Image (spheres, grey):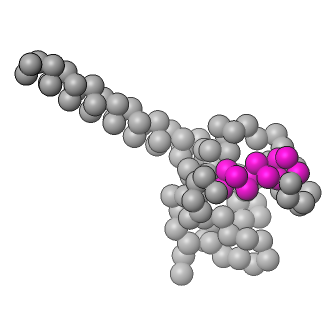
Amino acid sequence: MGLLIRLAAAASTTLVLATAVHADEKVEYGEYLSGSCVTCHQLSGADNGIPAIVGWDAEAFVEVLLSYKTKERDNKAMQTIAIPLSKEEMEALAAYFATIKAKE
């Protein structure tokens, strides 16, 4: 019985660590992809006529990108950016921008 508990605990710990590594990789990939985003959107969170995208909920971020990709939202610049993105790329961008806090 004790062996089964230790094996279950080890498996659980491994899963948690693997998930954390995967999340870190997603954020790093998002940072890598963010170049076209930060050309217009400020990492500081400033909104100078272009909405801030830092600190967003990741799920909401992906939903907005998908709405540009499917042309539900009308903005030619954003459609041009979103259309070629895969869902994985959108999720990585969302993970990255969710980690950034707006500067006050």
Q: Nearer the viewer, residue 99 or 43?
A: 99
Q: Residue furthest bottom?
A: 104
User: Which residue sits at x=76%, y=41%?
Assistant: 85
Q: Is residue 72 left or right of residue 54?
A: right
User: Which residue sits at x=68%, y=69%?
Assistant: 52
Residue 33 x %, y %: 67, 45
Residue 65 shown in magenta:
yes
Instruction: Identify the image quadrant of the C terminus.
Output: bottom right
Residue 23 x %, y %: 47, 42
Query: Which image quadrant is residue 53 in?
Result: bottom right
Q: Residue furthest left?
A: 2
Residue 103 x %, y %: 54, 76
Q: Which residues are magenta?
A: 61-71
Per the picture, the main secondary structure of the magenta-coloured stretch is: helix
Instruction: Identify the image quadrant of the N terminus.
Output: top left
Q: Is residue 20 left or right of residue 61?
A: left
Q: Residue furthest front?
A: 1
Number of marks in picture: 0
Please determine whether, in this image, residue 82 is positioned above or below residue 50.
above
Query: Which image quadrant is residue 26 in?
Result: top right
Q: Nearer the viewer, residue 64 or 4?
A: 4
Q: Is residue 77 at all visible to an observer of this figure?
A: no
User: Which residue sits at x=46%, y=36%?
Assistant: 22
User: Which residue sits at x=41%, y=36%?
Assistant: 19
Q: Is residue 4 at all visible to an observer of this figure?
A: yes
Residue 100 shown in magenta:
no
Residue 51 x %, y %: 73, 71
